[in-house]
Amino acid sequence: MSVARPARCLLSKRFAAALKPATPTCNAAFHSSAHLEARKKQRFKSIRAGEMGLTSPEKVQKYTEENFQPYTPEEIEVLKKHYSSEQMEALQAGEAAIDPKDLTIQGRLRRDPYQIPYLDDFSRLAPIRWLTEDEFVNDIAKFAKEVDAPQAKIWMEQKLNDPTLSEEQKDWVKGQLAKVTAQADRAKSLDGKGGDAEGLDLMFERSMLNDDNAPSDTSVAPSLGKDIPGISGIYQNPIDPEDQGLDDEGIYQDLKRRTGLSVREMMDLTVKILVVRLVHNQTRLGKIRSVWVLAIAGNGNGRLGIGEAKSVENGAAVQKAKLLAIRNMKPVPRYEERTIYGSVSAKFGGTIVKLDARPPGFGLRASARFFEMFRACGIHDIAAKMPRSRRPMNAVKACFEALTNQKDPNEIAIGRGKKLVDVRKVYFGGNVL
Amino acid sequence: MGLPHIANLCSHLQNASKARLGLTSAPHTKYNLALLLSMQKAGFLSFVTRGGAQPPDPTTLSTYEPEPLTSANVARQRLWVGLKYSDNAPVLRKMQAISTPKRAVTMKLPDLERVARGWDTNGRVNVRGLNMGECMFLSTSKGRHGGARGR
């Protein structure tokens, strides 16, 4: 047996151990964000303001004197013209109460481009208004005139060579450049004593006028124009001039077509919510709560309808139920346009509703829901009873069935081959309602 | 007493109406005959006639003569009645005996007045007032009559 073998085995074991990958650290991605290699090192060491000498008493004093100067005697004279002596006293007391040094250390002056042009003056409100396109252009042109013309000219020439600008913007700059050049020639001030052309950058700052419909804060965005390319002419305006502006949202348009009623007539109908139930649909994700609404509609002159609707939103259910009630209006036979013909009863589920005709002046002796139904369809004398179940939904439906399924006395008379005479009418010589 | 037969007649006419039959028959008794004739007068039936086991021919009904009643054929006689329908519904919708075989109901004039005006009786007998289009047929000492109520 060679000695090389154990040595080789030994080596191979060592190699195998070396080749074997180290126990891996957990590489699983437990989150979707990018992997942080290590803590990021600051490029620069942070230096405190005190080490830079910014908080030295001299610096603070200098800043205070620059920014928070007390009123000069001339300014006080001017103020005295505007304020009463008491107000002046209060003003001076306020001035004395606040140490300007405190303002420097604790206060914060805004240096951003959107700073308010006053420190503290709330005597009047500054109205906020969006400029129209024309106003905006005029405003910019006015601003450009205030800027030193030669500087503006230089700036505009630079802008013309800017490849990022669109052709329209370049055209506008060309037009303005001509004006500014003429102005500069006229002023003969080409030697240039310095100006602020930076303000012109505002023109090409993003705004709702030039952002090409990019996503923005819609709450302050202007409304869409009338002729939008691509969709203009596709959608018809649902507003009908016959409605006299009563139905700008187009809610009644479908109903108008179905019923033949005008929007005004539909709005004059008596529409009431009689039953509201909170119902739940149990799904594997949980309960879905909805609102079930039953509404009635009547014209007060012998027509009555009920509509039921369900929605997650209460308002939607109410509106649907009301519209359905108007759609489902049926004629209700009425004796002398005040009561029903004889006694009627109807059964819906476990509910039985018994209605009885009553003499003139009797009134509506019925439960609240029935009262609303009778009033909506124009019945003035009636008695109603519910001997059994009084569930609201079934009660209303049974009552509707009883009212609409009355037997016509003329039909009965025709069936029996008789002539019908209203004795009441004969007795009173036709002087009944 | 014809009360059990009247109850049978009521059920039979209701069933025939619901089945939309054109004509049907009832046992030939004096009580049935009086009631059916009253009902025909009130307009619930189109005709009432006596006949045998086979119904009379409807086409020749106006000239139909029933065979003479003899003691030989009287047991086979039946009353044939025509049922009426109007507006796709039977004219005779419901028929009920107020008097039952167990309890014959009698009423005097004040009660009859109330019932005919549509009011329930108060007192000894308990009869509901007549509703619109309902008729009540009475058996009196002067014969059998129909009392109708309508507005």
Image (tube, coloured by chain):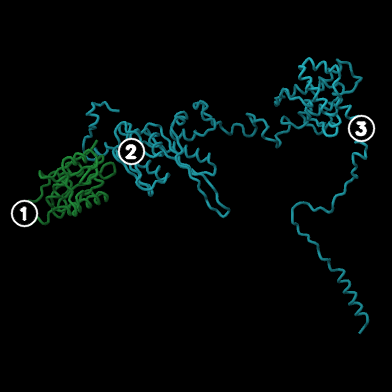
Q: How many marks?
A: 3
Residue type beneath disc 1: Thr
The subunit carrying tag 3 is: A
The green-tinted chain is B
- The residue lying at 89 percent from left, 17 percent from top is A189
Pointer 3 and pointer 2 on the same chain: yes
Task: Pinpoint residue A331: horizontal percent, then vertical percent.
Answer: 36, 36
Q: What residue do we see at 87% from left, 74% from top? A: A13
Splitting the image into 4 quarters, where does residue B84 fall?
top left
Q: Look at mark 1 in the image and give the residue it sits on.
A: B70
**Element under label 1?**
loop
Rounded to the nearest angstrom, the CA distance separating label 1 from label 2 is 57 Å
For label 1, the crowd category at 10 Å Cα-Cα, with few meaning under 14, some 14 to 19 and many 20 or more, is few
Do the residues indicated by labels 3 and 1 lie within the same chain of the protein?
A: no
Q: Which residue is mark 2?
A: A383
* Residue A138 locus on image (x, y percent): 75, 21
Q: Nearer the viewer, mark 3 or mark 2?
A: 3
Circle 2 SS class = strand
Residue situated furthest bottom in the rendering: A1
Disc 3, SS: helix
User: Could you tell me the amino acid type at mark 3?
Assistant: Lys
- Residue A59, numbered circle: 3
Q: Are marks 3 and 2 in contact (CB under 8 Å)?
A: no
Vertical comparison of B106 with A323: above or below? below
The colour applied to the residues of chain A in this rendering is cyan
Depth check, front residue: A364 or A427: A364
